[in-house]
Image: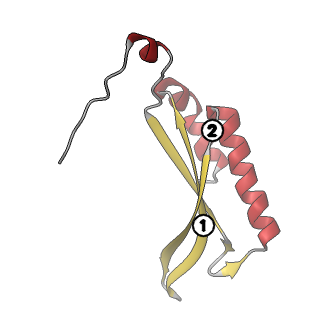
């Protein structure tokens, strides 16, 4: 395993910041078990998450991917997902953690 430390000048340190908390919301492309939603509904879902994370934490990154889960009746169900990621300072995350969980219906 290779470990390295980033060496910054004093000027670079003054212009940089660290966002130690990474949070991700996986937006599913289905409703219920394996019932695909429309592309318009998917865009709406993803845009809502992007807007929310931007407002609470300052930004986001969205990545398309493949997800899956196990269903007793259907076995392994696969679906397209969009992973929307945001980074935050620890105090800002703690302040908004409960709101983030409620927003995502958990």
Location of residue 28 (image quadrant): bottom right
Q: Residue at x 57, y 38 (%)?
A: 98
Callout count: 2
In contact (CB < 8 Å): disc 1 and disc 2: no
Residue 67, image x and y in percent?
Answer: 52, 71
Q: In the rendered image of this protein, does residue 67 appear above or below residue 53?
A: below
- Is 36 left or right of 89, judged from the image as shown? right
* Position of 63 relative to 22 (above/below): below
Query: Which labelled disc corresponds to residue 50?
Result: none
- Colour mapping: secondary structure
Q: Position of residue 66 (x, y in %)?
A: 53, 71
Q: Which residue is found at the position 51% from the left and 17% from the top?
A: 15
Q: Residue at x 27, y 30 (%)?
A: 5
Query: Label 2: which residue?
Result: 99
Q: Give SS at disc 1.
A: strand
At a point 60% along the width and 66% down the height, the residue shown is 81
In this view, 9 is above or below 76: above
Q: Please provide percent x and percent y for residue 3.
A: 21, 39
Residue wearing tag 1: 81
- Compare residues 50 and 35 and report the one nearer the observer: 50
Q: Find numbered disc 2 in the image and state the secondary structure of the residue it sits on.
A: helix
List the single residue furthest toward the right. 40
- Please tell me how crowded label 1 is: few (under 14), some (14-19), or many (20+) other residues with Cα within 10 Å: many
The CA distance from mark 1 to mark 2 is 22 Å
Up-down: is 42 above or below 25?
Answer: below
Horizontal and vertical percent for residue 90? 47, 28
Q: Residues within 10 Å of mark 2 (few under 14, many from 20)?
A: few
Q: Quadrant of residue 39?
A: bottom right
User: Could you say which is closer to the camera, residue 103 or residue 48?
Assistant: 48
Which label lies toward us, 1 or 2? 1
| Among numbered discs 1 and 2, the one appearing first in the sequence | 1
Nearer the observer, 26 or 16 = 16
């Amino acid at each position: 395993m290779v470990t390295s430390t980033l060496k910054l000048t004093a000027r670079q340190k003054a212009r940089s910041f660290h966002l130690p908390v990474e949070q991700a919301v996986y937006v599913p492309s289905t409703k219920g078990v394996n019932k695909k939603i429309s592309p318009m509904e998917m865009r709406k879902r993803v845009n809502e998450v992007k807007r929310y994370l931007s407002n609470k934490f300052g930004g986001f990154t969205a990545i398309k991917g493949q997800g899956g889960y196990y269903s007793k009746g259907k076995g392994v169900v696969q679906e397209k997902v969009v992973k929307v990621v945001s980074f935050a300072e620890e105090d800002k995350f703690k302040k908004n953690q409960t709101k983030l969980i409620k927003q995502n219906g958990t």
